[in-house]
Amino acid sequence: MYAPLFETKKAKGSSIYKLFATSIFVGIVFIWIYRATHVNENGRLAWIGMFGAEIWFGLYWILTQAHRWNRIYRQTFKDRLSQRYENDLPGVDIFVCTADPKIEPPMMVINTVLSFNVEPRSPEAHFRAESEKLEASQGQHLASVKKLYQVMENKIELATKLGRISKSALLEHKGFSKWDSFVSQKDHDAILQIVIDGGDAEAKDTEGCRLPTLVYLAREKRPQHFHNFKAGAMNALIRVSSEISNGPVILNLDCDMYSNNSQSIRDALCFFLDEEKSHEFAYVQFPQSFHNLTKNELYGGSLRVVADMGLKYGCPVEDVITGLSIQCRGWKSIYFNPERKGFLGVAGTTLDQTLVQHKRWSEGDLQIFLSKYSPIWYGLGRIKFGLIMGYCAYCLWSINCFATLYYSTIPALYLLRGVSLFPQVSSLWIIPFTYVIIAANTYSFAEYLCSGGTALGWWNEQRIWLYKRTSSYLLAVVDTFFKMVGNSDSGFVISAKVSDQDVSQRYEQEKMEFGAISPMFTILSSLALLNLFCLIRMVTKVVWAGGFESVHETMGLQVLLSGVLVLINLPLYNAAFFRKDKGRIPSSVTLKSALVALSLCTIYDLLW
């Protein structure tokens, strides 16, 4: 009798969620009706802008429902896989990619390559954890292995420091001989070296276990030829993989990701080797879970299995455009999130790193939307409409900047003149506004907690949500526009995987790291100070002249909006005015932002 290797189940409570989502949609429609029928003549232009922002928020919320409307869960049966294919499992090629030895430390790459069957799955973290608890008899063996590891570490760090390969290493590994004084990082021939031949009977470790084939590849690079960033590197690896191992399954690991997890690989194989279902799927995607080196955690990466094509060029987010093109050819994808995290990655420890990363992602997604591969016209008729909506929710990330910026500035400025942009507290029209706000945030909070987060984590997530939309996304739109008119080229920005000791210490203390002069920080600081100045000025007027009840009645939601924005920005105010460490906001940024905020307030007063 046929026994499936995996099964798919619908999430419980889906009908309740659909009813809940429908109620939020009804609330959104009532907000639109209110905006269209109750125009405030004292602030007509601002009112129209608010209407436009709320139309966008509502439409974008509808797009995001594609990710939640029909939630499903998948369960694999690895025991059945073992019984059926234990002696005939397909090969798995693991790609470990690295680009820059300064921001992607070579030892991090080596920890990925050397992750043998230990927990935690990083030799460095393993030695650190195990040396404290092992008995003397066990510790002796560990010490000998650790000594070998440290010798290797010293060689790598010396080469990194000198910027060249030592003579002894050149003699030991002939592939290194091609890295001579006549080549550079951006100008060299292809270098291919089989470091360990898995087919060799002598390729065993100290305990007699067979070692896998290990191949070093540096693809050819020339200054006059565009190398297509990571997509070019991945396609070079795929071509070499086909020639050397012909592995039908490819596991892609960035250099910042420690080790593969054999159990998760078997999970993936359950999808590929199921006799009745495997023909439907092109690739399995594991979610990445980001942690940091300072947390002494284990690290891994996301899994991409490419069927009969490589990654597409011409876009900073090559995985998105490749996945879309595969699905438009009739294949399906699987999103699998096992309880035991198979792959963990390293996230940035500074706000600047996070915002730059999201700028690249959102810029690349917008480029896809504006290209021939836009999910709307490229996917229409090829994939389901719900999947098109799901892709659009990501491709339109950056467009959220306009509505969010408007909501973050105009209501605060109109507080200065006491012009209300929301319904009165006693009006029935306040109901759809309060319901949508409370219901959407309550669901977001519950979803975050159910995913293993904390209340503080959720609040920080709202902060980053605001910061991304008002800085990363805005600059992504600007750069995309200049690229379209031929004045800019989007580069592939490599995320830093290492930070200095002071930054790591502040990260451990959960202090938000600014510490850089960045246009994104100027934008964030200007918005934060604008809301602070407007709120303080409004409160001062109320206290001086009285009339608290009137303000509460007519401008309750407006005051609440500015108040929430001020609360969200408390770490920013602290970094601008009180902190003395190197992670504070530079004085020049604070001064510039204060001038921008005060100028906006002054211009508004003069014009209105």
Image (cartoon, rainbow, N blue to C red):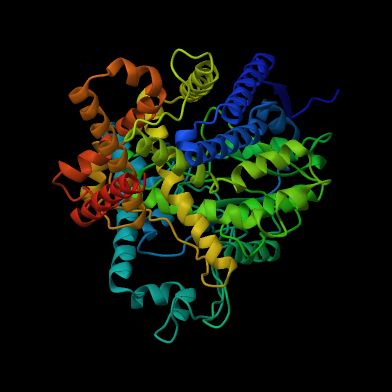
Q: Residue at x 45, y 19 (%)?
A: 424
The spot of residue 178 in percent (x, y) is 47, 80
Image quarter in which the C terminus is found: top left
- Is residue 538 found left or right of 37 in the rendered image? left
Q: Quadrant of residue 228?
A: bottom right
The spot of residue 380 in percent (x, y) is 80, 47
Q: Residue at x 55, y 62 (%)?
A: 481
Asked whether the viewer can see residue 345, the reply is no
The spot of residue 59 in percent (x, y) is 63, 36
Image quarter in which the N terminus is found: top right
Residue at the outermost bottom position: 182
The mark tally for this picture is: 0
Q: Judge whether 216 appears above or below 388 on screen.
A: below
Asked whether the viewer can see residue 469, the reply is yes
Q: Residue at x 22, y 51 (%)?
A: 590
Q: Nearer the viewer, residue 502 or 182?
A: 502
Q: Nearer the viewer, residue 553 or 435?
A: 553
Q: Quadrant of residue 284?
A: top right
Q: Judge whether 173 appears above or below 211 on screen.
A: below
The spot of residue 559 in percent (x, y) is 35, 26
- Is residue 256 found left or right of 13 in the rendered image? left
Q: Residue at x 52, y 41 (%)?
A: 49
Q: Quadrant of residue 170?
A: bottom left
- Is residue 5 found left or right of 177 in the rendered image? right
